[in-house]
Amino acid sequence: MFETIPAAAPDPILGLQATFKADPRAGKVNLAIGVYCDAQGKTLSLKAVVEAEKRLLEKHPGHGYLPIEGLAEYGAVVREMLFGAGHPLVKDGRAITAQCPGGTGALRVTADLLGTHRKGATVWISDPTWPNHFGIFQGAGLATKTYRYFDAASNSLNLAAMLEDLKALKPGDAVLLHGCCHNPTGVDPTAAQWKQIAEAVKAAGALPIVDFAYQGFGDGLEEDAAGLRIILGICPEVIVCSSFSKNFGLYGERAGAMTLVAANADIANTALTQVRMAVRTNYSNPPAHGARVVAMVLSNPELKQMWQDELKQMCGRIFGVRKALRQALDQRGVKLHKDGNAFIETQRGMFTMSGLTKAQVERLQKEYGIFIVGSGRINVAGITDAVLVPVADAIAAVVK
């Protein structure tokens, strides 16, 4: 039976991670996978997380199954972080939350829900986007199309083209939007642009799905939620797929959430029964540890402040790396864009869309042991002081 199964193409990001690990060169640099690294190049364990884990160990909550939709206290802190403390959606029942294995799990639960109950829907996805978006929704039997998003010529949002493409939406379609720190471009809409986008989606009768994996990695926790909250103020129904992988450093614990906002509490509760079915037939119920950590940190003022301080430090390091990389390229007379390298500092989040060609990316890997995604996306959070100069020298060499 298995002899007839063809080989699948490697994942464009995780496949590259495997190639990186197999490379024997001592000076190799991984700027492909979206993981935050500290100044020494190590994946960070936040002090607030470690302290919460100590307290959980003392309490020993056990290893029993969680409810299908996960911990109620986790759902409450997720909604508060998304919508803001005191927002009616935190407690009024219009929003229900299912704890999921990471942001990917949240997207897949969303895809399964739509695939079962909106079989004719098309999911519209930005061009470019995180490559796994297509596989997640197509795997649930949904059609996908793209809308234009990034203007490489100006290194900015192509709002006019995006709005033009959104006119093709049909009632019942869904639009996947990146809530902040757009992956891979780092280019986000302004508040005024978010309003235009939300109004276009509402006018079409489409459902906005907000992939919100990087809250706190752009301009701050509240600032990064501005686009989502504008959408909520305009569109009566929204699904938010969020994650604590990045802002809590809980990559391997798979702490994510799918939050569905309906017109009223009765509709939300009915939808929850179908969300439970989607979860039950997929992974049955979610993992516990990461969610317990998040719930403890966000419900304890001392731990929450500790975490917020650490998150600000992480963001500060990313901004510092962006500035240092721009300066290093400027010093070498390298222009990654016709207007210079200023875009490296203005983009938000962990990634910068460098403008490097596929051939240049291949040379970086082959000749210099520097691994980045074929699209030219660079994880700036992976650049340390120790590798900044070699990375800048190598980019200068392949560009010139």
Image (tube, rainbow, N blue to C red):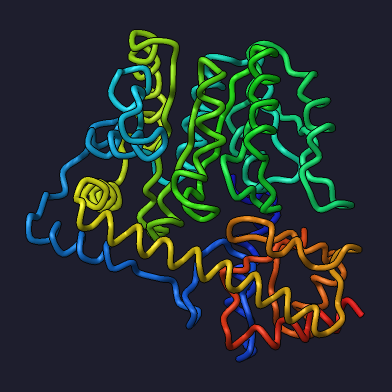
Quadrant of the rendered image containing residue 341: bottom right
Q: Is residue 128 above or below residue 268?
A: below
- x, y percent for residue 215: 48, 48
264 or 221, nearer to the observer: 221
Q: Residue at x 40, y 16 (%)?
A: 271
- Name which residue lies at 28% across and 24% down: 91
Q: Residue at x 62, y 68 (%)?
A: 380
Q: Give the percent coordinates (x, y) of residue 386.
A: 58, 88
Is the residue 386 above or below the residue 282 in the image? below
Question: How many marks can you see?
Answer: 0
- Judge left or right: residue 12 versus residue 285: right
Q: Residue at x 20, y 57 (%)?
A: 302
Q: Is residue 170 above or below residue 290?
A: above
In the image, residue 310 lies at what x, y percent? 37, 65
**Residue 30 appears left or right of 226:** right
Where the C terminus falls, by quadrant? bottom right
Q: Nearer the viewer, residue 137 or 128?
A: 128
**Residue that extends furthest to the front in the rendered view of this protein:** 192
Q: Quadrant of the N terminus?
A: top right
Whole-percent x, y for residue 333 in the image: 87, 81
Q: Is residue 86 above or below residue 396?
A: above
Corner quadrant of residue 173: top right
Q: Quadrant of residue 360?
A: bottom right
Residue that protrudes farthest toward the left in the picture: 59
**Would you say 262 lies left or right of 1 here?**
left
